[in-house]
Amino acid sequence: MILTRPVAAAALLAAALLLGGCGSPAEKTTETGGGAPVKGGSVVFAVDTEPVSFDAHVSSQDITGTILRNVFDSLVSQDAEGEFQPWLAESWEVSDDLKTYTFKLRKDVKFTDGTPFDAEAVKVNFDRIHDPKTKSQLAASLLGPYTGTEVVDASTAKVSFSAPFAPFLQAASTAYLGFYSPKTIKENGDKLGAGGPAAVGTGPFVFSAYAKGQSADFTRNDAYAWAPKGAANTGAPYLDKLTVRFLPESSVRVGALTSGQIQLAAAVPPQDVQGVTGNAKLALDTQEFPGGNYSLYLNTSKPPLNDEKVRKAVQQGVNVDAGVKSLYFGQYKRAWSPLSPATEGYTNKLENSWPYDEAAANKLLDEAGWTTKDGDGYRTKDGKRLTINWPLLPAAYVKDKRDILGQAFQADLKKLGIEVQRPQDDIGTYIANVYGGKADIADYSWARSEPDVLWLLFNGASDPRKGGQNATFLADKDLTSWTDEGRATLDPAKRADVYGKVQERAIELGLVIPVYTPTAVIGRAKAVNGVAYDANAWPLFQGAWLAK
């Protein structure tokens, strides 16, 4: 059978928030100003974070997927209506038990090193992702219960799983399951994280250069002729060159946009939105990200957050409303669930269900036995201070002023007598502590247009010490069972039921503190036309062009 993804009303709403224009049914693009596309020119896109690793099969960062989307194609694409369209696969069939997906591949696709894209390339890439030696932090989870790829013939690849795996088509549409040339995997497999020309794909742009801390350059793939069905531009990109600059300081990024030094700026801070919208030469593209909201995940594997009363005290003791409103000026919505409202399966039952309550938080801490205080005013029990370790990412990787938001929460918890330590080490130490279970709180968002993101965040098998992302370090029987059930069915009613229960139980157990729904806010020079946004709200430049 041919699969189509159920369309969530929220997803449709998110799509409707895209800027209008002449996008095809498969993509929503920025306006063209009534003119025809023009070939040539360069565009500079400034982003607020720099990838820790450029290896799409290894990295879990949104920024890695955002940037490499220009270099890698996928088997299928997910359009603005949530349906799947042919891309490198002309067609596909799915077995009734959802364990086998058979793809008929295009025969005219080549990697930019001249080698052909074929079924063997699918096998080499998926096997690499699945291999524990690759140490994938995300892509391996997107492959789920993968058992292997059979090369039926050069243009037919049969991908198999040990259990029903409904989210696979959506996973297969992401850049993380995009394809490197098998030749470069063989010759440069250990260098792909460093970015640059070794990252050979089939995409519309070639990764031509990278200067750490400064920029990454991408040049047009003149041979490109296999855009996804419905793309506004079916051929090679119009732009000669795309440059991604890393400008973590928002004032520098927005200043570069308003002065014309760059043409697009990601993560325009809320306080600068009016300055962009009020500039006749600029436009603002916005939409909510689907997937996991920006949330705090509480580590249940060790004291003090192994005590549910302490977790719930922390959950009710941080003033999320006040923090989000004061920092983001209404541009970002306060979150109530770990799942974004722009995602199929979101439940609104949690909205307003766990408001800030300082008195209730204090009562819970008393009940947990943290009844005495030391000379600095912090709660103690058995002579030990109530201290929570919440590592802070290095400055280059901090998004949306989350460090400032964390200071507000730190102050809220101090009022309860909880000390929050925020060490800011190098990225290697941060990863070792957070993913090794040594930290008490991990904070992140997770963009993905599929509620199976809840499996990643809460299933017992998604242990960060084994490549997963369940930073609660809890293997809860119900959360594991429900998220397993959700990925084994395409029945919309069943999925809504189990995913709704997952969201409610995660809050009930005090495992997570949803904070805000991340929103793509991109400032753009109006001279840049035809920028499309995929199902993850990431910008696509294959159809972008510069007005003369």
Image (cartoon, rainbow, N blue to C red):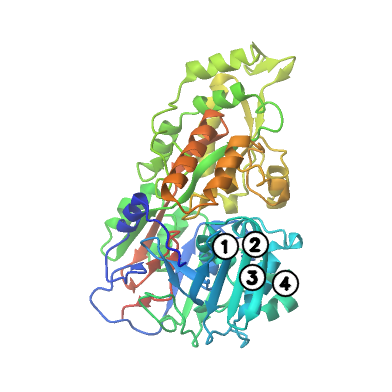
Q: Picture coordinates of residue 490 (x, y %)?
A: 47, 54
Residue 427 vs residue 161, the one in the foreground:
161
Q: Is residue 171 visible?
A: yes
**Looking at the image, is mark 2 or mark 4 earlier in the sequence?**
2
| Left or right of 140 on screen, residue 86 | left
Residue at horizontal 44%, vertical 48%? 518
Discs 3/4, front: 4
- Residue at mark 1: 64
Closest to the camera, between mark 2 and mark 4, is: 4
Q: Mark 2 is on which residue type?
A: Ser
Horizontal relation, residue 122 to residue 411: left or right: right
Please say whether residue 444 is visible from this viewpoint: no
Kindly indicate whether the residue at mark 4 contacts the one at mark 3 (C-beta within 8 angstroms).
no
Q: Which residue is mark 4?
A: 189
| Above or below for 111 versus 61 | below
What residue is pinned by disc 3?
A: 195
Give the residue displayed 38% in from the left and 68% down from the top.
532
* Distance between the alpha carbons at the discs numbered 1 and 2: 7 Å
Q: Using the image, determine if residue 272 lies above or below residue 43.
A: above
